[in-house]
Amino acid sequence: MDTEITLVVDGVEHRVTVDTRTTVLDALRERLGITGPKKGCDHGQCGACTLLLDDRRVNSCLMLAVAYDGANLRTADGLTDGDLHPVQRSFIEHDAFQCGYCTPGQVVSAVGMLHEMREGEPSAVTADGAELADEVRERMSGNLCRCGAYANMVPAIVEVVQR
């Protein structure tokens, strides 16, 4: 069964007809041609499809599009109006990507993580008085990288946190 929904992606409103079983990720990629969010595992385990929904990190491969009619979503492409977001700039400065496949999801997740930290939301290691790098590693643990660029991602994110 098909239904028409509206998704606001990076500030642009899109009307799209989807099968009621279509995920937000598939609606973005297959119906709207928005290819920043990637299909990695398609099970919510890798984070390649991470988007921001009201500044919260979400795995778009797990979200049925019909449940998010009218939702305001942000991808890595919609993080700024012109200049790079500080996380994007820091990823470039620290060479925090290799093949680039996971990069949009990593960047979006880092931006969402920074919002969580500013809001005072704890992680599993916060109460332990973890070092900032360990805090970042824990908070970013839902985003996987096939190339192993973590060694550069963590310092890139830490630098943005410390600004």
Image: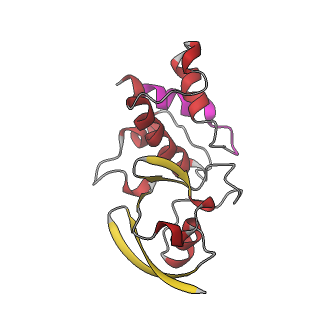
Residue at image location 48% in from the left, 68% down from the top = 34
Please state if 8 lies on the left or on the right of 102 as rendered.
Answer: left
Q: Nearer the viewer, residue 6 or 114?
A: 6
Magenta stretch: dominant SS? helix
Res 160 visible? no
Judged from this view, the residue extending furthest toward the top is 129
Residue at image location 40% in from the left, 37% down from the top = 115
Q: Nearer the viewer, residue 31 or 83?
A: 31
Q: Residue 24, position in %: x, y?
A: 54, 67
Question: Which quadrant of the figure has residue 111?
Answer: top left
Magenta-drawn stretch contains 113: no
In the rendered view, tell whether residue 118 sits above or below residue 38.
above
Total numbered labels: 0
In the rendered view, tell whether residue 79 sits above or below residue 94.
below
Please state if 94 lies on the left or on the right of 100 as rendered.
Answer: left
Res 31 visible? yes
Q: Residue 57, position in %: x, y?
A: 50, 47
Q: Residue 139, position in %: x, y?
A: 57, 33
Residue at image location 60% in from the left, 74% down from the top = 22
Magenta-drawn stretch contains 150: yes
In the rendered view, tell whether residue 15 sits above or below residue 60.
below
Query: Which quadrant does the N terminus fall into?
Result: bottom right
Judged from this view, the residue extending furthest toward the bottom is 1
The colouring scheme, among rainbow, by chain, secondary structure or one colour, is secondary structure
The residue range painted magenta reads 146-160
Residue at image location 55% in from the left, 12% down from the top = 129
